[in-house]
Amino acid sequence: MKKFLKYWLLVILWMAAIFILSAIPNLKTELEQDFLLRKIAHMVEFGILTFLFFRAISAQGGSPHKAIIFSFIFSLFYALTDEYHQTFIEGRQGALRDVGIDSIGILIASLICYIKIKGRN
């Protein structure tokens, strides 16, 4: 149970944070670069989710390569469900374009994890 909490609790909390942020109507800043900042935030939040998934799955003792693959898949699935969730929020819209932007962060985090495990060999 301690191991579960150490690794999976962060994953669950991060997913909850993404869900809560997605539930905020008209989530915008007053900055001129608002669009760019929101897209970078998408990449960062899903990159972090991918890393947290990788960390939790790796802690289970499986293959690091499989951990990368599953982390990628789980994060991409959550990005899809996040965009679907936004279709129910007034002032928000779900867009496949945003899933593509999320997937850039997912891919970058996956590549970093891959480089990290390759460095161990």
Image (tube, rainbow, N blue to C red):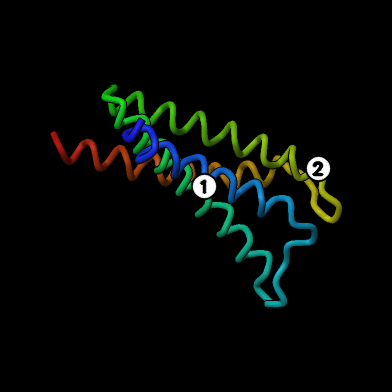
**Amino acid type, callout 1:** Trp
Q: Which residue is mark 2?
A: 87
Q: Secondary structure at mark 1?
A: helix
**Crowding near the residue tagged with mark 1, few <14, some 14–19, many ≥20 C-alpha atoms within 10 Å:** some
Q: Position of residue 53 (x, y in %)?
A: 42, 36
Residue at point 32%, 41% (across, down): 113
Residue at point 44%, 44% (across, down): 10
Q: The N terminus lies in which quarter of the figure? A: top left
Q: Which residue is mark 1?
A: 14
Q: Quadrant of residue 109?
A: top left
Which residue is the extreme one toward the left?
Answer: 121
Nearest to the observer: residue 3 or residue 38? 3
Q: Position of residue 46 (x, y in %)?
A: 52, 46
Which residue is the extreme one toward the right?
Answer: 90
Q: Quadrant of residue 63?
A: top left
Label 1 or label 2, whichever lies nearer to me, is 1
